[in-house]
Image (tube, rainbow, N blue to C red):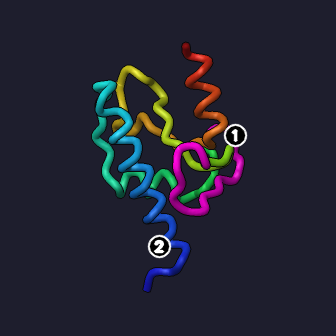
Amino acid sequence: MKTTGDIRLRELAAYLHTWTKAAVEYRHVRFSLSNADVLALVRPMRCAVTGAELRWDGRRSKLERGPFEPYLDMVDNSRGYVPGNVRVVCLCYGLARANASH
């Protein structure tokens, strides 16, 4: 039997998978993650870099996201979103890292 927590994690993984895949299409970034790959990354609900607890209250618009929402981050941007090159971080870390790269 699936618990409410399992269902929410599956919803979150599907949301991150769909949103990230759509976001990278125009940038021609390689994307070969499955929903199961993302679910495995999300399951701890901790930022892979800071250790902060991640929070997700459900689907929101891009403007309503909180600083501790999960965000898929590429370790090596040249490799794309492929298994072994992606980690889940808090949104504030992911955006700070992305902005520092520019």
Residue 77 lies within the magenta run? no
Look at discs 1 and 2 and give the one toward the viewer: 2
Highlighted magenta segment, given as a residue range = 48-64
Residue that numbered label 2 is attached to? 7
Tag 1 residue: 50
Most extreme residue toward the bottom, as rendered?
Answer: 1
Question: Distance between the Cα atoms at labels 1 and 2?
Answer: 25 Å
The reply to whether the magenta stretch includes residue 56 is yes
Q: Is residue 65 above or below residue 40?
A: above
Left or right: 27, with 60 as reference point: left
Magenta stretch, main secondary structure class: loop
Mark 1–mark 2 CB contact (< 8 Å): no
Which residue: 60% across, 56% down?
A: 45
Give residue 76's position: percent from left, percent from top: 45, 24
| Label 2 crowd (10 A; few <14 / some 14-19 / many >=20) | few
Residue 39 in picture, x, y percent from top left: 43, 57
User: Could you tell me residue 21's position as x and y percent?
Assistant: 34, 41
Q: Residue at x 65, y 34 (%)?
A: 93
Secondary structure beneath disc 1?
A: loop
Amino acid identity at mark 1: Thr
